[in-house]
Amino acid sequence: MTPTQVFLKENYDARYNTHHRKVGESEEAEMVNSYTPSKCPYCGSKKFKKNGYKESGVQRYKCECNMSFLPTTGTIFDDHKLSICEWMEYCLNLFRHVSITADSWNNKNAFTTSRYWLQKLFLTLEGVQDDIILSGTVWLDETFYRVRSEDVEYNDDGSKLRGISKNQICIGVATDKNHTIFLVEGTGKQSQKRTYDTFKSHLEPKSTLIHDKDTAHKKLVEKLALKSISYASKDLKGLLDSDNPLYPVNRAHAILKMFLNAHGGFMRDDLQGYLNLFSFVTNPPDEMLEKVELVINLAFQNPKTLRYRDFYGLNTGA
């Protein structure tokens, strides 16, 4: 190789090794050992005891069922080869709205790895919006996101479906300026039943609801005894942000669209996973490292696992 090629290779290898430290090189054992399993991941028993350490320094446990396990067993970190700190950096990039394509370039990961990690993050964040209840003054409105171009449906004569059709996915957004929720309501135009079913457990009864005059909100207002302040959409067009009474929710719509567009042609079946992620990023705490810590806590406290081969449907040879 030429001197320039040698220089480039050495620096590339140095950066790659920095981003891809092995578990035993990352000093993560103390952090992993701080999470004591609540039960055996194999039989569910709480009768287990410490049983030495791995070479990496991670604590081993042995259960009365005679199975050995680690704090990471049964979690998204189960049998991981690379250090958790690399996964932490991956999360930080996503929280800053970096696409997984760009993250793959930055961290020198295969795109397949980044996509697999994203699904593990979605799995960890399942239900992350379930306990959010908005109160006081709440701004609510729906926005729409198109299906992928290859999934667009047409009329029998080949013409495009008119209006808000099943080619558009309805996303309900509501905020009380302290917390914001983002939930899939279905495809096509929203209905009273879908809107009520989507938001009924997320709004405190008797709150004040600021929204447009869409009839889909009627059941929600009546059932939760909300104080309704509504505006005709046509009267809001062209208003400055400072004059628009729906600005808080409109701003959430705009930032959400930027986030989704950064990820390109993702599978729409994953949309709620992206919305959970965006909600997690949008809501407190504001400090990104605190968010990463929350994700790691969720991973250990509510163990779920996803094997690479299972995710990609690879033949395991069985």
Image (cartoon, rainbow, N blue to C red):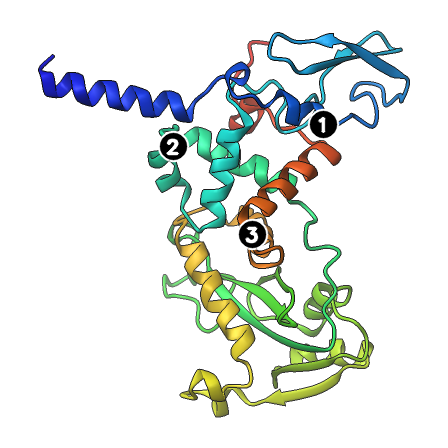
Left or right of 209 on screen, residue 89? left
Count neighbours of disc 3 (C-alpha within 10 A) and say few if under 14, some if 14 to 19, many if 20 or more: few
Look at the picture and state if 191 lies above or below 294. below
Left or right of 9 on screen, residue 94? right
- Closer to the chain start, of discs 3 and 2, is 2
Look at the picture and state if 155 lies above or below 75. below
Residue found at x 47% / y 45%: 94
Name which quarter of the figure residue 293 lies in: top right
Amino acid type, callout 3: Glu
Residue found at x 72% / y 69%: 134
* Residue indicated by mark 1: 34
Name the residue nearer the viewer: 309 or 24. Answer: 24
- Closer to the chain start, of discs 2 and 1, is 1
Q: Where is residue 86 in the image (x, y as percent from the top left)?
A: 48, 30
Spatial separation of the CA atoms under disc 1 and disc 3: 22 Å
Residue found at x 52% / y 30%: 85
- Whether residue 302 is visible, yes or no, is no
Amino acid type, callout 1: Ser
Name the residue nearer the viewer: 35 or 175. Answer: 35
Q: Where is residue 87 in the image (x, y as percent from the top left)?
A: 51, 32
